[in-house]
Image (cartoon, helix red, strand yellow):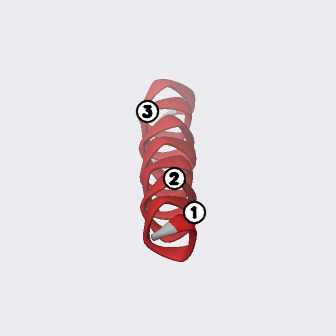
Amino acid sequence: MSGAEQGVLLAAILIVGFAISQFIQRRRRK
């Protein structure tokens, strides 16, 4: 795996984790 691929993979993991945390917060508020 190249450095660029690792960077893209890390960014994707961060975005997914952020989206899940936002989704959980929205469900908790209701």
Q: Do the CB atoms of the residues marked 1 and 3 lie less than 8 Å apart? A: no
x%, y% of residue 22?
51, 53
Q: Do the CB atoms of the residues marked 1 and 2 lie less than 8 Å apart? A: yes
Q: Which mark is residue 13?
A: none
Q: Residues within 10 Å of mark 3 (few under 14, many from 20)?
A: few
User: Number of labelled discs?
Assistant: 3
Which residue does the numbered mark 1 point to in the structure image? Answer: 25
Q: CA distance from mark 2 to mark 3?
A: 21 Å
Secondary structure under badge 1? helix
Q: Do the CB atoms of the residues marked 2 and 3 lie less than 8 Å apart? A: no
Which residue does the numbered mark 2 point to in the structure image? Answer: 22
30 is higher (above) or lower (below) than 15: below
Residue that appears at 57% across and 46% down? 14
Nearer to us of marks 1 and 3 is 1
Looking at the figure, which quarter contains the C terminus? bottom left
Q: Amino acid at mark 1?
A: Gln
Which residue does the numbered mark 3 point to in the structure image? Answer: 8
Q: Nearer the viewer, residue 24 or 30?
A: 30
Residue that appears at 57% across and 30% down? 3
Q: CA distance from mark 1 to mark 2?
A: 5 Å
Q: Which residue occupies the extreme front position in the image?
A: 30
Nearer to us of marks 2 and 3 is 2
Quadrant of residue 5 within the rendered picture: top left
Q: Nearer the viewer, residue 19 or 4?
A: 19
Secondary structure under badge 2? helix
Which of the marked residues, 2 or 3, is nearer the chain's N terminus? Answer: 3
6 is higher (above) or lower (below) than 29: above
x%, y% of residue 26?
47, 59
x%, y% of residue 10?
56, 44
Q: Amino acid at mark 2?
A: Gln
Residue that appears at 54% across and 58% down? 17
Which of the marked residues, 1 or 3, is nearer the chain's N terminus? Answer: 3
